[in-house]
Amino acid sequence: MTISGGKYICYNGDFINAADKIISPNNRSFRYGDALFESIRACGTEAQFLDLHLNRLKHSMQWLKMTIPAYFTSENLSLLITKLLNKNRIFGGARIRLTVIRNPGGLYAPEDNTVSFVLESETLESDHYSLNPHGLIIDLYTEMPKPVYRLSSVKSTSALFHVLAGIYKTENKLDDCILVNTKGHLVESISSNIFILREGHVFTPGTEEGCLPGIMRQVIISCFRTNNQKFSDNIPLMVSDLLSADEVFFTNAIAGIRWVGAFRKKRYYRDFSQKLIQQLNQKAFGQQ
């Protein structure tokens, strides 16, 4: 099994050809989904919001009883990311995937809790965040509700709920779809957190609803607080909230903000999303 991406990857600090086989059949991510990952945006060989990504990763590693290596610091990872992007000659926008895998050994019970890591890079079309020109067409994915428990907030390589939602999206010719939890409340989209604007007030599902604590979600919430934007993340959201919303938008670390154009027969504006992505670019890159 090989890991694809740029010409080079970084494996435990060493830079090797991406075509080299580094995953064996006893790999614990392959066997049990015993791994975590972070999708990080970079621009000009510099990772964006790396401290937030690393804090979330370490928090999840502690909860999963993985040993956190001493070299897992923002400074060290930033240097490795910069070296990887330089080796792959990516100097604009880039997607970085950092995967942390518990080392082989044992069956369900691991022999130890040490980890290995892989850094991959991929070129993005734009070096800054840009709003999608056409609004997303979305619907709900309700065939398999997402359970609400501690693992719901862990970004692991075991992502079958999102895989099945992705298949549903493709089969139904949608751009994305929203997962619901076992209470029927809105949770998140396939790869993003969801925000709803109604009468000047922004709402997003709380982590107690089972959504991932997205990095871009944190960044956008901090923008709201800076701008004194009316905002709530403690109110369960239902289908009726989608139908009464003025705008709906998704956020993730790679795309930034994507606006939703339609949910079934409901149509949405994008004025708020347009202004918000300008604020995001200013915060991330100092761009207007």
Image (cartoon, grey):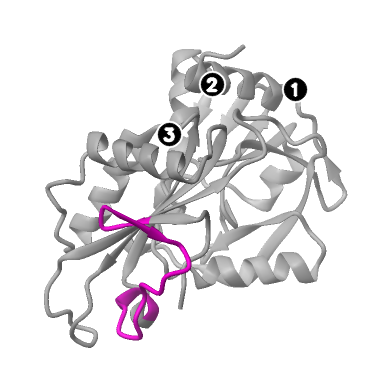
Say which amino acid is labelled 1. Asp
Q: How many marks?
A: 3
Q: Nearer the viewer, mark 1 or mark 2?
A: 1
Q: Nearer the viewer, mark 3 or mark 2?
A: 3
Q: CA distance from mark 1 to mark 2?
A: 16 Å
Say which amino acid is labelled 3. Gln
Residue shown at 22% from the left, 72% from the top: 103
Rendering coords of residue 137 (x, y %): 80, 50
Residue furthest to the right: 265
Q: Quadrant of the N terminus?
A: bottom left
Q: Does residue 19 belong to the magenta stretch?
A: yes
Nearest the eye: 60 or 201:
60
**Can residue 164 be seen from the camera position used here?**
yes
Residue 128 to residue 19: above or below? above
Name the side, left or right, on which 87 lies relative to 77: right
Rendering coords of residue 58 (x, y %): 23, 49
Mark 1 lies on residue: 271
Of the numbered discs 3 and 1, the one sitting upstream in the chain is: 3
Mark 3 lies on residue: 218
Q: CA distance from mark 3 to mark 1?
A: 21 Å
Q: CA distance from mark 3 to mark 2?
A: 15 Å
Rendering coords of residue 251 (x, y %): 57, 40
Residue 37's tag is none
Of the numbered discs 1 and 2, the one sitting upstream in the chain is: 2
Q: Residues within 10 Å of mark 1 (few under 14, many from 20)?
A: few
Nearest the eye: 200 or 29:
29
Residue 230's tag is 2
> Element type at marker 2?
loop
Q: Does residue 92 belong to the magenta stretch?
A: no
Name the side, left or right, on which 165 lies relative to 217: right
Q: In the rendered structure, which segment of residues is drawn in magenta?
A: 10-30
